[in-house]
Amino acid sequence: MENGELQSGVWVDDRLASLRPGGEWQPNAAGAFSRLRRRARVRRSGWVGGALAASLTCMVLLLALPTRGSCAQPFMGMVCLKPASAASGVKASAGSASVSAPAVNSANYKLSGSPQAPITLEIYTDYECPACAQFYVNTYPQLVANYVQTGKIRILHRDFPLPQHPFATIAARYANAAGEAGSYDAAVMQLFRTQGEWAQNGNVDAQLAKVLPPGVMQQVRSRIAGQRDAGIAVDQGAGYRDALNQTPTLIIVSKGKREKVAPIPSFNILKSYLDQLR
């Protein structure tokens, strides 16, 4: 190759010309498509397996993520959590101890069921806790129908308002005032059912007025003015002795033992456990 040819580009042009297809060449689209399909079939088997594995991994991770109902700001280890799923056993976080029962609130409106019932369930709740609301709306009615009304257990409500919930104590005051006026159960259920509304602004009064008669509401308001929190303090003291670390928490009192269950499992699991105790 002469230097003149390289400079003039003759040699490069010759090489490029040799690479061009002849005039008789035509694209074979059908053949190319057939080859692509064969390659796709080979790759698809591996891809499907990988995608399936990835999907299962994502499902596991999603199930492990905290739920929206969890309280975002723990205080002294206390957080309100969603009740355990049906996959969790009732004894997973339960502890037993042969200790004397803490003081019971003298206001008997918090206690329901037969005094002769062999089992007592003490339920610690925070009215602003989403998990507590779910428990009372979904599980509590089944406990009452299957165990309280049949004389098998009795239930003691205990107030345990958490500091991170600004309106929980106010709600407890209203519920207890309603209890003193003879409408405790109706007030408790209404507070939990309408939690998403009054928790926005603390207007507990407006929600209770929807279900309590005017005369009862008048009594409730007069009692609220005094802000008598003695009953709440009794329940909180009992909770500290029971070493609470979340709401809702269930204390099962049976055969001289107090067993703490938290988080509270689904009704079906709780039922199977309670049936074993009787």
Image (cartoon, grey):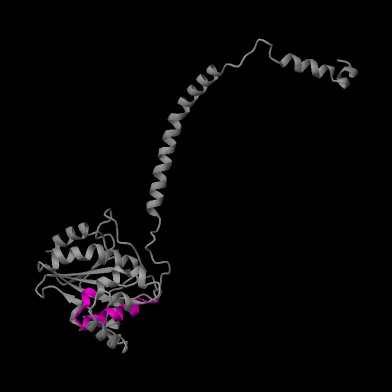
- Which one is in front, 264 or 129? 129
Considering only vertical position in the picture, is 254 above or below 42?
A: below
Task: Give the position of the N terminus as an image quadrant.
Answer: top right
Residue 151 picture quarter: bottom left
Task: Give the position of the C terminus as an image quadrant.
Answer: bottom left
Residue 267 picture quarter: bottom left
Examine the rendering and report whether any part of residue 100 can be seen. no
Residue 72 picture quarter: bottom left
Left or right, residue 109 beside residue 5: left
Where is residue 154 drawn, in percent x and y? 15, 71
Toward the front, the furthest residue is 214
Toward the bottom, the furthest residue is 226
Where is residue 62 drawn, in percent x and y? 40, 51
- Which one is in front, 43 or 226? 226
Considering only vertical position in the picture, is 43 above or below 114?
A: above
Q: Main secondary structure of the magenta part?
A: helix
- Which one is in front, 135 or 2? 135
Left or right, residue 168 beside residue 120: right
Considering only vertical position in the picture, is 218 above or below 39?
A: below
- Residue located at (25% from left, 71% from top): 189
Examine the rendering and report whether any part of residue 176 can be seen. yes
- Residue located at (48% from left, 22% from top): 38
- Residue located at (41% from left, 40% from top): 53
- Residue located at (45% from left, 31% from top): 46
Q: How many marks?
A: 0
Range of the magenta residues? 166-186
Toward the top, the furthest residue is 24
| In magenta stretch: residue 184 | yes
| In magenta stretch: residue 237 | no
Where is residue 235 drawn, in percent x and y? 27, 79
Where is residue 108 drawn, in percent x and y? 18, 81
